[in-house]
Image (cartoon, rainbow, N blue to C red):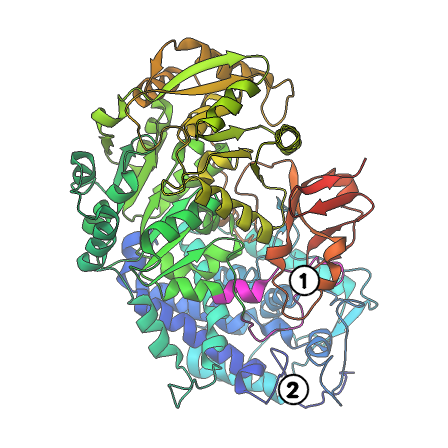
Amino acid sequence: MQPKLTPDRLLAKEVEERWQGSCSLVGHTADVVRAVTLLVDVLGDRLTEQFNLGCTLDELKATARLAAYLHDWGKANNHFQGVVRQKMPGAAPKRNPMQHPQLVRHEIFSLLVAWEFREWLEQAEGDLLTALAVAGGHHLKLGGKAGAKTNELGEIRWGCGDDRIAFYFNHPDFRRLLRFGVKQLGCPAKLKLTRKPTLAWTIDRIKAQRQSVLLDGFLEWQPNAVLVAVLKALLVAGDSVGSAIANQKPTKDDTKPLKLDRWLREALACTLTEADLDRVIQARLGDHELRKFQRALGKIQTRVGLARAGCGTGKTVGAYNWARRHAVGRKLFFCYPTTGTSTEGFLDYVQTELKSVLQHSRAAVDLELARTGEEAEAGDNGTINEAAMKLQSFEAWESQAVVCTVDTVLGLMQCHRRPMYSFPALVGAAFVFDEVHCYDPSLLGALLRFLETVKVPVLLMSASFLPAQLQAIEAAVGEPLEIVKGPEELETQPRYRFHYAEQPDWERVEAELAAGGKVLWVCNQVNTAVGVYEEARRRGLKALLYHSRFRYEDRVQHHREVVDAFKPEREEPVLAIATQVAEMSLDLSATLLVSQIAEPPALIQRLGRLNRRYCGHALAALFYDDPKDRPYSRDKLSRGLAMVQEFAGDVNQAQLAHWLEQEQNDLDPERDSVLLDGEWRTYPASLRQEGYTVTCLLEEDRERFTKKGAKLAELTVPLLADSRQVSQWERYKGYPIAPTEQWEYSREIGARKRC
């Protein structure tokens, strides 16, 4: 027997201040079908030009609409309806998902329930099996767990308190949903099924249905991988925007709510003009002219171009000149390896010149979407700030330029939430990827899959490209590459003079500071950097400390203090002690570099902070040993030492790039992509190689992070912690909470493990 519903409606979301049509299952379904339809219509030919879809735009639209129609069918059950009613006075049923999660997530039930109606749905417009895979994965939780592939169609939660679930197939709202399919999807007017749909599903019934879908459906399925990938991204984006925009309240300047059709067309039409890019370039150049190298970047004719140039050569300005040829009429995504570099790129170039947005995993957004109540369920770890992430993606839709971490784009290959939500903005855009030589095998593999799948203008920039990298990139692109080398007059300037010792030379550091110099000291580990900082303070030196083990809000402050202290107009001497975060995050020019030996690419990046604003002669770089094996292996440390000892006298950037390119490095990019290779599966997997840290909240901050409206990302701290120990920690909205008895924190030093 079906539990009675109060109010007597099938809901798709929690009802907030007042009843809204899109909170109902039928209303939300209609909104998402409409949103997906609009996306296909507005993106139009760019979808077929950019991707090898293997079908017409009309065929794509039909399957996209069918997937949108089916995506929330699984909400018509007593568990989900209890979750969305848990905070509603006088409502029934009620279900607290933290204590009693749903037996199976609603989108998995959508797939299983639609399979129950497949005889009817197979007569609709669009490919049903493809639509089922797309609909079942629209919350990115299908066929994967903890980033690894599984062969299960959804998880059965044994601790949910129930061994069965009831469906409302006879409810008037579900019948309205069926009539919507007749009117909008071309389903037959009469529902004819061989077997009457089951209203009460036991665990055995669920298992049998999963097995039927796998064996009778997906086992022999041979889809066009790119088509399925595009459909998945379209539904994720369409679901996120469908009712959110339709439900916007009027603003002071608008007497009517924001309409989806108008907003979507205007947002995606917000692209660059030649005048916009001229303004960015001129703001940076001032009274100077473009260099020959920068002009050459603007003349690249191939779809994918390469800029091989070292630090301080002006390749970023050159990239915007490249965009004058390749990004007019498009959005531009400028992708950096780290949050620090993306922030600096945003502040230095486009913040005031374009309608732009800064996007990375911690960029602040203080907005909320209507919630389903499933965002944090017991036994499901929840989704961290999903509502804020969705709304931040809408900013990308509305922007001419997006300055971001590379994850914002290449994360698409591994089904990361942010790029899936931003997919409509990515379609038809132009892309610049900076510091490509820093990509690990996982990131490089994702770049190669992106280049071979997404046919858009791309500029790759790097201090050096290994021959094997060039071959792999050219193979992925499938056509010749045009390579522009950095200005010889700059790259052959004698910038560095290497000195090596087993121990750091404190006397040389103190002498440089006494002479008014600016010293950057880079360590391989946070604990080492803290030790150097404490020794500097003991010696009476005024020092700044910058590493990753700060709360994000404090790290931003330390970052800004270091960058500001090195500005030319600041005449005071400075000693900044940092970890690898200095390699790309810090745009500064030191007069003395002190560094532990590291792998060669890391050392070259650190050298890019020395004599960046060329003073006319070489400056000293002091290197000393690192006895530890983390984060670099002994082999990588030996290669770094070999590079340092290779050069005597003055050294220039061209010599370092040549040395690196001559190294015999095996190139083994990790090319697996969940989006392209997962078939029916859709789940987020790791984009970068696994590190040693885990992003946590601190127990001492509990009062702050549990406060309503708290911006959790600003309070996170990356900690070097044992994964087995972390698995035992309490969690808050997906983040582990580091216990106070194990970790201490100060704004000056950051987080440290208690002895």
Residue at left 65%, top 35%? 692
Magenta range is 367-391
Query: For the residue marked with disc 1, what is the amino acid?
Result: Gln
Q: Which amino acid type is marked by label 2? A: His
Q: Are marks 2 and 1 in contact (CB under 8 Å)?
A: no
Q: Secondary structure at mark 1?
A: helix
Residue to which mark 2 is pinned? 171
Residue 560, percent from left and from top: 49, 48
**Position of residue 173 measured from the top left corner of the image (x, y, whole percent):** 60, 86
Whole-percent x, y for residue 718 in the image? 64, 44
Asked whether 298 or 707 is in front, the reply is 707
Which residue matches tag 1? 209
Q: Position of residue 435 (x, y in %)?
A: 39, 36
Q: State the quadrant of the C terminus.
A: top right
Asked if residue 636 shows in the view, the reply is no
Magenta highlight: main SS: loop
